[in-house]
Image (cartoon, helix red, strand yellow):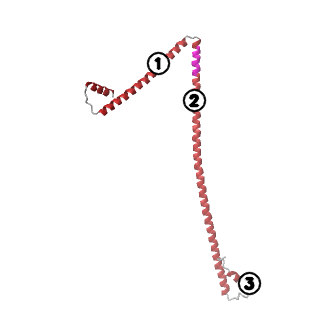
């Protein structure tokens, strides 16, 4: 890009107008300008970082020189550096503890979430099982009721048939049942239809 920009500037200065289009020329100029601005920003950041690194190195060198003097100031600097080192280790320890507590909290939240999901599934299973039990019990109750009604109906029909058989036996025997009180009671009792009761 930079080379193209230089070529274009040289061509313009030399009076050569061999460009395809004015828009393409503007695009190249704008693109080259943006590239140069980015390079300039990168160079400024790099210079700033190098300056900071140099200043740190100078401070460390000055501290070393001061510590070699072994006077009251150097002892104070050494004590301060030791205190900073101790505090740094304490901070690192606390950060590790915080990280462990956060991990434990995350684990507890995950466990609660899994328990909640598992509990919901079990509750749903219980509801489904209860519903099936109720449906099954209702079916059994209806089946049992139908079975009892069927058996009652069968007993009535059998009783009716037996009554008719007895009536026919008494009537077929040509006994005058109207004169005998005992037979009269039996015949009148047999007249009652069990099915209609």
User: Which mark identifies residue 189?
Assistant: none
Asked if residue 39 is among those painted magenta in the image, a careful observer would answer: no
Place of residue 124 in the rendered image (x, y in percent of width and height, measured from the top left): 58, 52
Read off the residue under disc 3. Answer: 182
In the image, residue 68 above or below residue 31: above
Q: Nearer the viewer, mark 2 or mark 1?
A: 1
- The reply to whether dot 2 and dot 1 touch (C-beta < 8 Å) is no
Read off the residue under disc 1. Answer: 54
Read off the residue under disc 2. Answer: 95
Q: Which residues are magenta?
A: 75-85
Q: Quadrant of the N terminus?
A: top left
Q: Nearer the viewer, mark 3 or mark 1?
A: 1
- The reply to whether dot 3 and dot 1 touch (C-beta < 8 Å) is no
Q: Quadrant of the C terminus?
A: bottom right
The mark nearer the N terminus, 2 or 3, is 2
* Of residues 175 and 45, the one drawn nearer to the viewer in this rendering: 45
């Amino acid at each position: 890009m930079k080379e193209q920009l230089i070529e274009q500037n040289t061509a313009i200065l030399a009076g050569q107008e061999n460009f395809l289009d004015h828009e393409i020329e503007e695009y190249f100029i704008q693109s080259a300008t943006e590239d140069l601005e980015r390079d300039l920003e990168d160079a400024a950041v790099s210079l700033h970082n190098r300056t900071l690194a140099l200043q740190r190195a100078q401070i460390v060198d000055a501290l070393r020189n001061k510590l070699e003097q072994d006077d009251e100031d150097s002892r104070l600097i050494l004590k301060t550096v030791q205190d900073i080192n101790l505090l740094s280790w304490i901070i690192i320890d606390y950060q590790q503890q915080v990280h462990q507590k956060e991990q434990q909290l995350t684990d507890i939240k995950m466990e609660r979430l899994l328990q909640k999901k598992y509990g919901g599934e079990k509750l749903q299973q219980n509801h489904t099982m209860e519903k099936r039990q109720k449906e099954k019990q209702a079916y059994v109750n209806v089946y049992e009721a139908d079975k009892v009604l069927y058996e009652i109906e069968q007993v009535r029909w059998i009783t009716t048939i037996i009554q008719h058989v007895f009536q026919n036996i008494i009537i077929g025997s040509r006994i005058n049942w109207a004169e005998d009180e005992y037979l009269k009671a039996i015949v009148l009792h047999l007249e009652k239809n069990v099915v209609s009761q």
